[in-house]
Each structure stands twice: as structure tokens, then as C-alpha cells.
Amino acid sequence: MKSPNIPRNSVFAVAGMVGVGKSTMAHAIAERLGFQESLENVAENPYLERFYDDFERWSFHLQIFFLAERFKEQKHIFENGGGFVQDRSIYEDVGIFAKMHADEGTMEAVDFETYMNLYEAMVLMPYFPHPNALIYLEGPLPVILDRIEMRGRNMELQTPRSYWEEMYRRYEQWIESFTACPVIRLNIEEYDLLGNEADIELVIEKIAEKMKKTTPRV
């Protein structure tokens, strides 16, 4: 198997809405490149189920928890000199989830301001590396909703379809204006990492090509 021309200290973030397959993609890329995975701490999140029961009461708590976890992970990545694939980026936490709840009135304005103050202080820290590329997973909403239903998490199944529709709309707008790092867009209908492990090579080729275009010559 050909070794891809991708620096060993690279950091990649896998982005996309709930159910799009971020964890599967992050694991496949990390395994192929010999990188470490930086995964969302869902299992130990004390607010997640409460949040799905009551957005208004728990949205701020949930986002602060995720922000703290992201900050710890960024510091860990910096201290280890890179070589990581992140399952979801901090940019989504801010630009999609926190902002959506602030706009919808399920997070109070004062809480959103506090959240943004914390975020802005964090990204100015010297050990807050931007990813070398954001790998954005996208596809038709019906396909994504089918995936959410198939994985069968009760808290997601009980969530109104309108919530997912609004999230999908916001993701489409968000990625069009995203500039924090180069973006690699992948359509989830054009690969099947679970059904065909060789499909990861198509992804790796796209990453290597993007890195070749964006890495400055010395």
C-alpha cells in the first residue's frame, strides 16, 4: 500500500451534521495514516440526554461541557506535536450548535455571550492549533435522517424532524463561509467505508492532493 505524502504532524478535523458518519471517517483516516483519534466525549457527557429532553434548560451546560473538552483536546494535540484526526471541530460547536440555540431562543443571550467570550479567549492561546484541513461530510438530508434512525439512539429518535432540518440548513450555510483552514468536501453517497474498506484510499488521495496544494514550499 502506497504511503501518502502527508506530514506526520498534520491535524485533520472531520465535520458534518449529526448522523453523517464523522466517527467512522475519523477512525478510518487515523488508522490508515497511523494517527491518533480525538473523539467526542459523548459517553461521559452528563448533559446530553437532559439536553434532548429540554433544549432551553440544558443547551448552555451542554455547550460549555463540549467547549471544555475541546480545549483539553487541543492542548493534548499541541503537546504531542500533531498527528491527530478530530471527530468534529470546535468551529461547529460555535458556528452551528451554540449559535443555533442562541438564535432560536433556547440559549439566553447572556449565556451565549459568556460562551463566546470563553471561546475567543481559547483560540488565542498558543497551544490552539488550527487543523491542516477540515474534512466536511455532506449528503442529502433524507439519507442522513435514515442513518440517524438506523443507529437508534432514543434521544435522537425523539427529536423533531424540524430540528434536523434547521441544523442541515445551517451546516450548508456555515461551510460556504468557512475560512479557518482548507476544506475537503466528501459526498457520503460516493463512498462506503463500512462496506468497502478500500474506499478510504479515495479519501486519503483527496487529503494528500489538498495538502500538496496548500503546504508552502521551503
Image (spheres, rainbow, N blue to C red):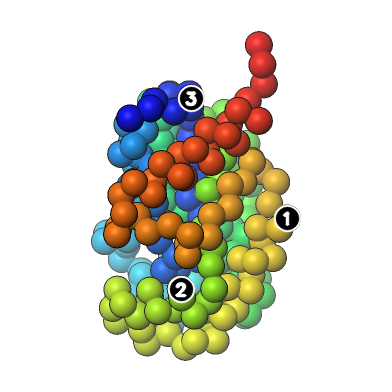
Q: Point out which mark residue 22 bears.
A: none
Residue 149: name its quadrant: bottom left
Task: Name the amino acid, label 3.
Answer: Asn
Asked whether the residues under the numbered discs 1 and 2 touch, taking CB atoms below 8 Å apart as contact, a structural biologist would say no
Which residue occupies 62% across, 60% down?
95
Residue that mark 3 sits on: 5
Q: Earlier in the sequence, mark 1 or mark 2?
A: 2
Element class at badge 1:
loop
Which residue occupies 26% across, 61% down?
43
What is the C-alpha distance between the residues marked 2 and 3? 32 Å
Image quadrant in which the C terminus is located: top right
Task: Name the amino acid, label 2.
Answer: Ile
Nearer-the-camera pick, 11 or 91: 11
State whether residue 61 appears in this view: no
Disc 1 residue crowd, few under 14, some 14–19, many 20+, Cα 10 Å? few
* Image coords of residue 34 (percent x, y): 32, 31
Residue that mark 1 sits on: 177
Residue 125: name its quadrant: top right
Q: Point out which mark residue 144 bears.
A: 2
Q: Earlier in the sequence, mark 3 or mark 1?
A: 3
Residue 215: name its quadrant: top right
State whether residue 172 appears in this view: yes
